[in-house]
Amino acid sequence: MLVEDVTPGERLFLLRRRREDTTSHEAAAKEWGVDVKIYRGWEQDVGDPPVAPLDEVRPYEHFALLRRRFGLPRKTMAKDIGISEILLWGMERGLRSCRMLKEYWEG
């Protein structure tokens, strides 16, 4: 997935996930100086989200964005693949190999 294919809300989502010290919506909203409801809307591309700088989309982030775009709950996808939610979480964070995710999405 190219950076150009990522919406402003998805950029905010990825940047928030990358920051271990501010992983909550509340912390991100505070950082941007807006109410948490506004920030949550921004991540869903509601309103007028800022276009945050993003240098690349990492392979595991690509799979997290696909799951998010399809509205697929982590629990459902983990069950479909035959793995635990914790393992799926680790794959989408780049902590585990995402080979199974690649196979899942490529069919």
Image (cartoon, helix red, strand yellow):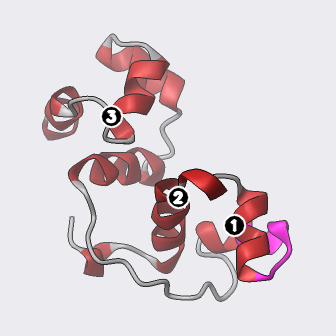
Sooner in the amino-acid sequence: mark 1 or mark 3: 1
Relative to residue 59, is residue 33 drawn left or right? right
Disc 1: which residue: 28
Q: How many marks?
A: 3
Query: Where does residue 36 sit, x and y in percent of width and height?
Result: 82, 67
Q: Tag 1, which secondary structure?
A: helix
Hey, which quadrant is residue 94 in on the image?
A: top left
| Residue 19, numbered label | 2
* Residue type marked 3: Leu
Instruction: Give residue 95's mark.
Output: 3
Q: Are marks 2 and 1 in contact (CB under 8 Å)?
A: yes
Residue depicted at x 28% and y 29%: 96
Q: CA distance from mark 1 to mark 3?
A: 22 Å
The 10 Å Cα crowd at callout 3, few under 14, some 14 to 19, many 20 or more, is few
Amino acid of disc 1: Ala
| Residue 52 in the image: above or below residue 68 | below
Query: Can you say which quadrant of the picture contains the N terminus?
Result: bottom left
Q: Which residues are magenta?
A: 33-39
Name which residue lies at 35% across and 50% down.
66
Q: On the rendered structure, is 50 left or right of 51? A: right
Residue 81, position in %: x, y? 30, 18
